[in-house]
Structures are given as C-alpha cells and as structure tokens.
Image: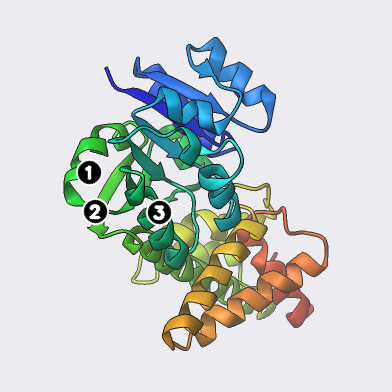
Amino acid sequence: MTDLGFIGLGIMGKPMAGHLVNAGHTVHVFSRSPEPVRELEASGAKACSTTKEVAEKSDIIFIMVPNTPDVNVVLFGFNGVADGVKQGSIVVDMSSISPIATKEFAEKLDALGTEMLDAPVSGGQVGAQNATLSIMVGGKNEIFERVKPFFELMGQNIVHVGPNGDGQMCKVANQIVVALTIEAVGEALLLASKAGADPSKVRAALMGGFAGSRILELHGDRMIHRSFEPGFRIKLHQKDLSLALETAREIGVSLPNTATAQELFNAVKANDSEDLDHSAMVLALETLANHKIE
C-alpha cells in the first residue's frame, strides 16, 4: 500500500488527513501544533518531527497550509520536503497559493525527480469534515490519475483543470465568484430589510428563482441570524483575493469588483473581525447603510 504524508493539520487539514487514515492508509503527519498530531496518531497516523521526515517516509505528500510563503518553507526550508523527498515521489499542494509561485515550485521539484500537483479545495471546514470538497487540480494527467483515488476520500467534485498552476488559477476564480456573490446577497438583503421587507421571506422567495444559490441559502441565513462563527475566515478570503489581484496585475487584467470586495473585507478587519466567517462582509455594508438586517 502507498505510504502517504500529510503536512498541515489545521481546521481543513486535520479532517482531510483523517479521511486518509480512516481508509486504512499509512499516513505520516506533521504539524507545528502537537494536538492534531496526537489526535490523528490515536487513530493510527504516524507522527513525524519534521517535514523532511514526512518526505523520507512517504510516496505521496499532501500539503495543506495557509499561504504561499508557508508552502515555500515546507518545501524548501530547513529540514523541508526537498531535503528528504525521494525520486518518483509526488507532492500534492492542497493549499490556496499563488499560481505563479506554484509553477516555480513545480519546476524546482521536477529538478529533484519529483512530480507535483496543485490541488486547492473549496467547501470550507464542513466540506473537509464531510469529505465533500471540490478539488481543482493542476499537473500532469497521468499523475492526477494516480492520486485521484486519494482525492476521492476527501472530496466529491474532482476536476483536472490543466497543467501546474491551473488548479490554483481555478481556485482564485472560485474565490472571486464567492466573494462577489456574498457581496450581492448582502446588498440585496440589506436593501430589502431597510425598505421594511422581511429579509427571511425575501430570501425564501429568491431561493426559488434564478437568484438562488448555495451562498444565498447558507450565507444569507447567516446574515439574517447574525451567525458569523467561522466556516471560512475573512482573513483567509482576503488572502485569496490578494492572490487574485496580484495575478491580475501580473497579466494585465482589471478586476474592479474583486477590488471592491477586498475593501469591504478590509473594513471588517479594521473593526477587529477578520476571524469571523466571510459572510460577515455584510457588516461593512450595514455600516455604510447605518442599518442592520433584521
């Protein structure tokens, strides 16, 4: 059976690694926090002291960390994956990071005789826990087919998008759509509420028409009931929109509404609320309107 590695055991990584362990695979795990390592070890995972050790013991190494610099450290930092990786191994980065940096990382790993897939996910903590994530994959098709059975333990909608970097580009596009839809739902419910209409009934009516969406269903409900406990934190969505805007500058594309959504997130962050769920973008809109949805 293939030896697996999993680096990064946060609110997303821990349940994702757990699905691999529960399927009976040998999974070597590393995290800067000892608690999730102990929890997974109790289920049968093998604890490692460095990312180098994970690479030495694994044929396929999954990474799930917050940002581009974190992936760089995991791969190429002191006692990193590059120091221990075996020729013929596969590195699968499931973090959401820069598409441009991803291509550079893939080239460096290729020089070491190691393949790479970029496989960012959408679905948040709930999707990670329920193994219902959408997984967007960049890399060689034959490598994707080798890893696909493991993806199927963590997600449902699994799409090979194209070569290295295309998975990350797809995730950036996803986060633009999500952010702008959250903003649209917030504006619609805020307008209805301030005009005196019942936002719950407006939402119910919209759900039956062309405006219906998962964001209207889930995050519209959060906005109405002021339920902003994080499923996906604002600060993480800010990071993703920064990647979108940075990439757009690199290739000469204007993203005006993405920039507006980022400014609304910035306004919420300025009020010390960056750890709230990204549906809390509506708080910035409510401040502008001097009205709360109710």
Q: Secondary structure at mark 3?
A: helix
Q: State the image coordinates of residue 182 (x, y, percent, origin top left).
A: 54, 67
Say which quarter of the image contains residue 272. Answer: bottom right
Q: Quadrant of residue 199?
A: bottom right
Foreground residue, 182 or 271?
271
Q: Amino acid at mark 3?
A: Lys
Which residue is pictured at 64% across the width and 53% down the height? 233
- The residue beneath circle 3 is 108
Disc 3 to disc 2, how far (Cα)? 22 Å
Task: Tell me where residue 222 sits by quadrant.
Answer: bottom right
**N-term-proximal mark, 3 vs 1:** 3
Of the numbered discs 3 and 2, the one sitting upstream in the chain is 3
Q: Nearer the viewer, residue 212 or 119?
A: 119
Residue assigned mark 1: 143
Seen at 73% across and 59% down, the residue is 274
Residue 39 lies, in percent from the top left, at 60, 18
- Give the amino acid at mark 1: Ile
The CA span between labels 3 and 1 is 17 Å
Query: Element type at marker 2?
Result: strand
Circle 1/circle 2 CB separation < 8 Å: no
